[in-house]
Amino acid sequence: MFRVLQFQTSNSKTIFSRNDSIYKPFLHLSRSLTISPLKKQRVFTRHKVSTTETATETDSIGNGRFYYDNVYPLKIGSFDIRHFLVRSNRTRLEEKLKAGKWIPAECEMPYNFNIKGVEPRKKEGGMFVNFVFRVDPAQKKKALEEITQKVQTFLKDKSIVPWFNVRPTEAYLVKGEPFIEDLSNRYPASRLRVEFQGPDIPIETLYEHFRPYGLIRDISLLPESSKDLPRYAMIQYSKMRSATSAKNCIHGMFVNATRLNIVYDMPLKTNMVYNWMASHPRITVPLIAATVAGITYTIFDPIRVFFITSKITQRFNIQENRLYQWLRKETIDRLMAFREKSDDNDESFEDLSTWKEREQEESKLRNWLKEPPETFIVLLGPNGSGKSSLINKIIQEKRNKVFIKCDVILNSRDENELVSKLARQVGYFPVFTLMVSLSNLVDGLASATIGQKTVGFSSTTDTEIKKILDALTIALHDIAPESLTKKSWYAHKKSRDYLESPMVESYDSAEIPIVVIDAYMTKDKESHELWDHLAKLAALLVENRVAHVVFVSSNIGIIKHLSRALPNKTFNYAVLSDAPHERAIGLVKRHVHNKNLEGLEAAVGALGGRLTDLKLFINKIRSGQKPNDALQDLVAKAIIDVRKLAFGDDSEDAKTISWSGVQFWKVMKELSSEESLSYDAVKFSPIFNGDDTPIRAMEQAELISITQLPNGRPYTIKPGKPLYQAAFTEIISDGLFAATMELQTAEYLLSIENNKIKKFEDELEKLGSLFVKTDGKWLFGSGHVPEPVEHRVKFLLSLLKKRHIRAEEYQKQIEELKKVVAKGG
């Protein structure tokens, strides 16, 4: 049966006989098709029909799928919380699709286009849109291209840009069979591993199929020599979303009889950050250190400065509150007034400023503290002379003060405790002492990994001390009077370490902070790193007129050490001595009431005025001992100390001492009968021969004390403390020990004389070699001996004679002393 169609175009009419063989090519030629009956045949008319539509009798239902990218944020790991900010309801997505957000309305789409469902791919940031359409099977590919083009044009015109990305949403036709999975530990990556189920595909073909989804950085095929199966290619995209689109659209597609299976290569997981950090320590370790330093600077440093300021100003100390002070004055102080009045005539060991002998030093210290800070204030004196008590009384009424007790700090079990004690004394909080050990461990592991000695992450005790003192400097600068520490805002902004000193204006001396560094540079730990840090801190504070710095020490050697920190300036220093005889007797009598004081004056005269010894002496008398017995106990202990310090416990210990036994024996023997010795006389004696290094070492060991003139020149030598003079006398009274030391001294002096004699004889021998042996004439000149040579020979002979006489005397002493030693004293 035939039907006749009248196909009308804009220019002509054409009539065809419709059958299955010739009708199909003309179904898509025009959007205006008029069908009219001829010869009474059935005819129908359709208006506004697309040329791509087909008649229902030969059409079939086709299925398709779009992949929409940039619908959700990419989930790059389990820590990614952006997905909690978006909704992924399937119904909501379908409503948006049918409302025309991402796709044209179905009535505007060709081929009876109809959306069948949505599959969200939240992890990969997109969704699948399933659809059906009606088309002749032979035209299915072309129909899909038209539908895809229409959707992509729609998205391009609308330019839908989500809040989480600057790229617009795009749609791609799915050409394969996507692997829809919900593996919890697999995340997108920008690199794809394309596995071949079939023959290898060349790079050109891969590029043709994968390039539409984004810019490709590189494509690499597995080498033909490799025996790995399955065969694969690596495709590296510049954007991760390009890789996700390609994977979801091409996975399962056949290319030249080869199926493509696609997976993400090296998926970005939560532990990949750790793996990257572990494999790049040269970058990550300094970055971590910088981050920690930044956090410390922005968060902890202001907190620490606040606590240091509170410690200095006693902000939270109730005893410094004016209301508390007024209440105490009107209550407790009034009740205690009678007791204080009765004790007015009682001198204690602590109230040393009431001594008339200390009035001059006290007056100097008070005047120095009233002036602007210009240089160091150094308070020297032997141990137990009351230096700390005196300075504490002078600054008791000062508002802003800091005490750094070095002896307490250095008496620590380890470095962490040392840092904690220093931080506690200045108010530095919080302090993480454990971080010192942990950071050193991290630095050791990192250096072992990258092969470097250090990577700059370690936090040593030296750096921790510097941090504490830097924070103290900032706090003191904030507290100091502005008239003394004014500086330009630019200098303050540029650096925290360099301060500018303007011209002095009016100021309140009570407002100037005072830093007291007590027990500075103790003699048993003169090489500790703490001394340099404290000296630099003091120099910075004084040079910028921020605070007074008072060094309290028993080591006279600190003058030279501090001069390196603050050159070109002289120091203000005061020296305290022991209590005079009358003052010492008065102190003892006031503290040993109703005791047997027979022989007290003689005992105190031998004991001296050292306060620490006087305290021990008083305690022994209070316990029931007589003054002479108490003195003998103290002398016996002093003898043991002197023997150990001066001569050592054994021969091995003696080798570590900086002086010889003969040298100290000379000083000790002379000090046993004299209160003081001339420093220069001892220095240039034959035993020392002009070298004062052993003398300085004895002074550092506190066996002797050196008195200086106001110009700083050493002048006299005294025992380390008065009690040592009695100990020296007792040691010398030991006949056998004295004979042994005198024997060593005579042997030492004899060796000196023998060396001199040998030197003179060698010179005479050289002069004698210049004579002719046959006739005894001088080799040069006229044969007569020159007058200068003759005088030199006579001079050497006179010296040789004197040395021989001395050597004979020493030899006789040695022989006699050996007999004494052999008899056992």
Image (spheres, rainbow, N blue to C red):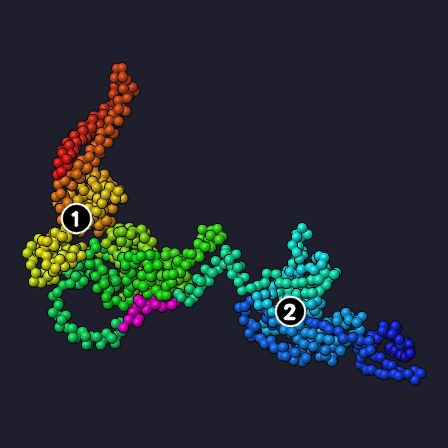
- Toward which corner of the image does residue 362 lie, by quadrant? bottom left
Please count the marks in the image. 2
Residue 732 position, x and y percent, is 14, 43
Q: State which quadrant residue 620 falls in.
A: bottom left
Q: Is the residue 286 above or below the residue 141 in the image?
A: above
Tell me the residue that label 2 is attached to. Answer: 180
- Vertical relation: 394 (above or below) 49: above
- Looking at the picture, does residue 12 appear above or below residue 663? below
- Res. 560 mark: none
Residue visible at 57% across and 66% down in the picture:
185
Residue 74 locus on image (x, y percent): 59, 69
Write the start and end of the magenta stretch as one range: 302-318
Residue 152 picture location, percent across and down: 70, 72
Q: Which residue is mark 1?
A: 639
The secondary structure type at the circle numbered 1 is: helix
SS assignment at label 2: loop
Is residue 786 shown above or below 293? above
Give the alpha-carbon distance from disc 2 to disc 1, as whole Å: 94 Å
Which of 146 and 590 lies nearest the eye of the viewer? 146
Identity of the residue drawn at 18% across and 29% down: 804
Looking at the image, tell me whether mark 2 or mark 1 is earlier in sequence order. 2
Instruction: Inspect this view and state whether residue 725 appears.
Output: no
Q: Is residue 151 magenta?
A: no
Q: Nearest the camera: 527 or 42?
A: 42
Q: Nearer the viewer, mark 2 or mark 1?
A: 2
Q: Main secondary structure of the magenta part?
A: helix
Question: How dense is the environment of label 1, judged by Cα within 10 Å: few (below 14), some, or many (20 and up)?
Answer: many
Instruction: Give the position of the C terminus as an image quadrant.
Output: top left
Q: Using residue 233 as the reference point, say whether residue 647 is left or right of it.
A: left
